[in-house]
Image: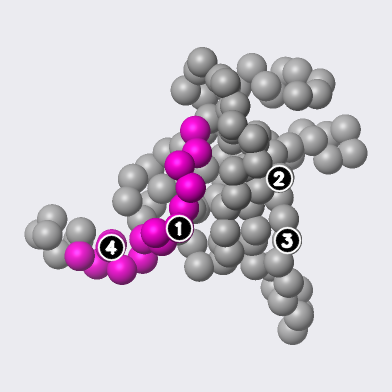
């Protein structure tokens, strides 16, 4: 049964995902559909956590927008995600740097 699941899952996994870790600054290009129009929206922020495995791998990215912290949880292998770019490598010593939520700016 695991062999069948791995084969089906491998069809959905993207190969061009960079190796990112919590604390890194990333830029996510996401397809957004508004009515009949479609565009690519860029979401840039600090990677807070990675979770899941295989085709179910998710990342949580946090940014500040107009003085308000915004977090987005995104599936890495979703067809709506165009690409993920590594902007700056972070030096976080924690697996989930939630302390960034309490800071004003980072």
Which residue has dot 2 on it? 44
The answer to which of marks 2 and 4 sits earlier in the sequence is 4
Where residue 18 sits: x, y (%)? Answer: 48, 47
Label 2 to label 4, Cα distance in Å?
Answer: 28 Å
Q: Nearer the viewer, residue 29 or 78?
A: 29
Q: Which one is closest to the eye, mark 2 or mark 1?
A: 1
Q: Is residue 25 above or below residue 106?
A: below
Using residue 4 as the reference point, say whether residue 14 is left or right of it. right
Using residue 87 as the reference point, say whether residue 21 is left or right of it. left
Q: Residue at x 49, y 33 (%)?
A: 21
Q: Nearer the viewer, residue 59 or 20?
A: 20
Q: Nearer the viewer, residue 4 or 28?
A: 28
Where residue 106 sits: x, y (%)? Answer: 75, 24
Which residue has dot 3 on it? 41
Q: Tag 3's secondary structure?
A: strand
Q: Residue at x 76, y 80 (%)?
A: 37
Label 4 to label 1, Cα distance in Å?
Answer: 13 Å
Label 4 to label 3, Cα distance in Å?
Answer: 27 Å
Q: Which one is closest to the eye, mark 4 or mark 1?
A: 1
Where residue 49 sits: x, y (%)? Answer: 51, 33
Tag on residue 10?
4
């Amino acid at each position: 049964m695991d062999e069948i699941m791995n084969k089906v899952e491998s069809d959905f996994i993207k190969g061009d995902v960079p190796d990112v870790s919590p604390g890194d600054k990333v830029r996510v290009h996401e397809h957004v559909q508004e009515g009949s129009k479609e565009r690519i929206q860029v979401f840039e922020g600090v990677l807070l956590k990675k979770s899941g495995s295989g085709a179910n791998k998710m990342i949580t990215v946090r940014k500040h927008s107009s003085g308000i912290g915004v977090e987005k949880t995104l599936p890495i292998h979703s067809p709506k995600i165009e690409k993920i770019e590594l902007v700056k490598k972070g030096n976080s010593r924690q697996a989930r740097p939630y302390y960034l939520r309490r800071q004003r700016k980072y």
